[in-house]
Image (cartoon, grey):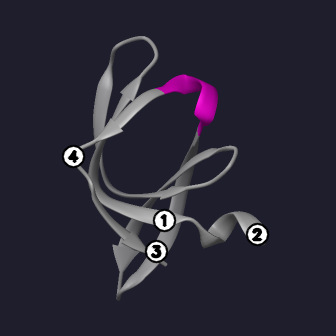
C-alpha cells in the first residue's frame, strides 16, 4: 500500500479546523490525511484516521522517516 510510506511524527499535537487540539503518541502522514497510531515493539500500529480537510495544523512533533 503506497500510503504507508509516509513520515512518522511522534508526540504530536493535531489542531483541528474547529480550533480543538488533541495530542497523539504517533502519526503517519499520508496524501489523504493522517493515520493515528501507536509505537509497539518499534513498529507503527494503526489505530485511526483523520482526514486532511479536518486538520488545521500539526505541531510539537519529532519527525523521523520510515
Other residues around mark 1 within 10 Å, as few (<14) / some (14–19) / many (≥20):
some
Counting residues from the start of the chain, the first of labels 2 and 1 encountered is 2
Q: Which residue is mark 3?
A: 44
Q: Which mark is residue 46?
A: none
> Dividing the image into 4 quarters, which one contains the N terminus?
bottom right
Q: Is residue 6 left or right of residue 64?
A: right
Counting residues from the start of the chain, the first of labels 2 and 4 encountered is 2
Q: Residue at x 30, y 26 (%)?
A: 21
Other residues around mark 3 within 10 Å, as few (<14) / some (14–19) / many (≥20):
some
Counting residues from the start of the chain, the first of labels 3 and 4 encountered is 3
Q: Which residues are magenta?
A: 51-55
Q: Which residue is mark 4?
A: 60
User: What's the CA distance linking mark 2 and mark 1?
Assistant: 12 Å
| Vertical placement of residue 22 versus 41, above or below | above
| Residue 54 in the image, given as x and y percentages of width and height | 55, 25
* Secondary structure category for the residue under label 4: loop
User: What's the CA distance linking mark 2 and mark 3?
Assistant: 15 Å
| Residue 26 in the image, given as x and y percentages of width and height | 36, 60
Callout in the foreground (2, 3): 2
User: What's the CA distance linking mark 1 and mark 4?
Assistant: 15 Å
**Residue farthest toward the bottom in the current orientation of the protein:** 41
Q: Is residue 23 left or right of residue 9?
A: left
Q: Main secondary structure of the magenta part?
A: helix
Q: Residue at x 62, y 35 (%)?
A: 51
Q: Quadrant of residue 5?
A: bottom right
| Residue 29 in the image, given as x and y percentages of width and height | 53, 54
User: What's the CA distance linking mark 3 and mark 4?
Assistant: 19 Å
Q: Which residue is mark 1?
A: 7
Q: Is residue 53 magenta?
A: yes
Amino acid at each position: 500500500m503506497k500510503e504507508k510510506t509516509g513520515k512518522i511524527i511522534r508526540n504530536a499535537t493535531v489542531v483541528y479546523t474547529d480550533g480543538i487540539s488533541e495530542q497523539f503518541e504517533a502519526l503517519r502522514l499520508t496524501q489523504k490525511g493522517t493515520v493515528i497510531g501507536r509505537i509497539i515493539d518499534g513498529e507503527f500500529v494503526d489505530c485511526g484516521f483523520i482526514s486532511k480537510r479536518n486538520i488545521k495544523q500539526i505541531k510539537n512533533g519529532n519527525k523521523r522517516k520510515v
